Amino acid sequence: MGKMKYGIGMRTQYAAGTDMHVAFNEQMEQARLAEKLGFNSLMKSSHLAGHPLQEFQQVPFLGRVMAEAPSLRLITGVVLLSLHKPLDMAEQLATIDVMSGGRLTFGAGLGYREVEFKAFGTTSKERVKRFEENLIAINRLWTEEKVSMSGSHFELDDAALSLKPAQKPTPPVWIGANADAAIVRAAKMADAWFVNPHQKLETIERQAELYKRALDQAGKPFPDDLPGCREIFVGNSRTEAIEAAKPFLAAKYKVYHQWGQDEDMPDDDNDLSLDYDELLEDRFMLGSPEEIAEQIIAHNKRVGINHLILNFHWVGMPQALCLESMTRFAEEVRPLVEQGL
Amino acid sequence: MTTIQFGLMIRGQFPQEDDMQQRFAECMEMVRHADRLGFACITKGSHYAGYPLQDIQQLPFLTRAMVEGPNLRLNAGIILLSLHKPLDLAEQLASIDVMSGGRLIFGAALGYREVEFLGFGTTQRDRVQRFEENLAAIKRLWGENDVNMVGSHFQLKDASTSIKPVQKPHPPIWIGANADPAIRRAAKVGDCWYVNPHNRIGTILKQTEIYKRALDEYDRPFPEEFPIRREVFVAKTREEALRLCAPYLATKYKVYHQWGQDKVMPEGDNDLSLEFDDLAHDRFLIGSPDEVADECIRLHRETGVNHIIASMQWPGMDYRITMDAMQLLSEEVFPKVNQAV
């Protein structure tokens, strides 16, 4: 297992009424700081029709932010793959990969919001089927010269891409999965299961066993890179960090609950409407540098996560607070983890 | 006094064996050059499954290019609107407009390639309906929240985009049209008709009359900005200009003919397989600075176009030749044209 790698999560979410020009500049500043602090990657999420939350769209944002952070890998966390057409995604992502000099990691997930399914002319019921056929089609388009394939919502008729990705055979493929069935799918179809930020570590530990069994069944090895995503705030103490993050993080998870994110989570861990103090247990990394380092080591030892995407920023959070947390992470937490591994 | 603006079309299309990271870097050099030379915009076209030509995808390209050309408007010229879902485009284009500080131009047209229609789960037959409903939906999504709309291939249910464009009421909508009904549509629902590069000036004159009559019929004013795309090349002499560009331009038009571009052009001017001299006559702006300036002035005087988007590079052509021609255009043609009008 390799050294621990770190990324910053860039949801780019802001409250209604925020000047998005200011927001944009803040996001570029966060990317530049991540580059300066020696992070390994950045991740951009995807939602559409997210009002009243404001956010930048995933592919355009990655196209722009890559100029601010020339060393960082660019992760789609995640493409809501069930919504899209594979020819479109294959070409958009190949472009991001080529323009960045081969830095794309293709994270994909199902999506869960009715307004998004409807707007893309599909339904929640179709999402697994569309996800699977889209992923297969994209992989074929990336690796074969010409592709003929009949999907449930598209037709590839001797289609040959305008552009292949820079990375060969393809950029790494990660599947974001909350529910058990999706984790099995990740084992079969992806290079790695992309562990989500919503679940408690003990749930993830259970699911990791499921993941390993599914890998064995598929005849695949445990991935070199096992990525996971966590909410984080580095403070002077646990109490202080919990209080500092509360206004922003609590609000974020209320929205997740409203949007129905928890409906996709396993029965033993699917209530994001819990009170913040209960919600954060075993789920969010909030504490002093020593406490956070311990939690990261635990994620590594108990689950095998060695590429950690950290969400430092939530809706409404002042930029200075976010930058400070990022800086403390790099200067105080990271060295402790290295010593402890 | 009128100002004639000049934009640069960056085709971004290259032969199959080319190193696309290298070519992309050259494109960015051209963007920087255009910015320094006082071009008004860069324009990027869109195609999918463009093999055997390699192509960089339009929207990610523009998001990366916005950094290299901070003074340039970004023309998505044109988006194949019939292929897409309106929420997707409304969101992506709003992101690009906000990130660039309000520099987006929303070009749109029907598209004509079967492989693209099929890849997006649609057909040639549906393209007009989809174009019209998509455009109507995008305008609504940009202007209102809680949009409810049932389209033939999507449903908007209380949908509100995450962000709205900076430009108000929205980025300018340029509608590309070859055939007469499409020109009438441009008069009805666009901010202007975006004249394509393929038609001879005689055809454009006839079509401008159709456009003006339609504007009257729909009670819309003649647009303040009336753009046209042209194949342009300039050198010290006409002979040198032809020597430098003719081989590449001829190949490009053979590909257009293979792809069926001329099938959607009007009777009497719909054969792109003609021999080069025949093809170039009254269609391409190629010559010495004086000759090209004269043609631009003539175009403006006869049709009213006041924003000339110049395509100056064709597949296989060394970009340094284009860079030189861009310089000559800026130094000698821009001022000549603007002094005369």
Image: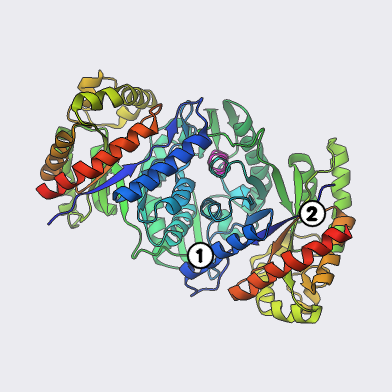
In the image, residue B246 lies in the stretch drawn in magenta: no
Task: Please tell me whether mark 2 sits on a helix, a strand or a loop.
Answer: loop
Q: Residue at x 64, y 37 (%)?
A: A167
Residue range in magenta is A86-94
Residue A24, label in figure: 1
Q: On the picture, is A181 further left or further right than B207?
A: right
Tell me the mark number nearer the camera, choosing from 2 and 1: 2
Residue that numbered label 2 is attached to: A4
Between residues B91 and A310, which one lies in front from this camera angle? A310
User: How packed is label 2: few (under 14 Cα within 10 Å), some, or many (20 or more)?
Assistant: some
Q: Quadrant of residue B144?
A: bottom left
Res B178 seen here: no
Chain where mark 1 sits: A
Residue placed at 44% from the left, 62% from the top?
B98
Residue A111 occupies quadrant:
bottom right
Mark 2 or mark 1: name the one nearer the start of the chain: 2
Q: Is B25 situated above or below A234?
A: above
Q: Is residue A247 left or right of residue B246?
A: right
x, y percent for residue B322: 33, 35
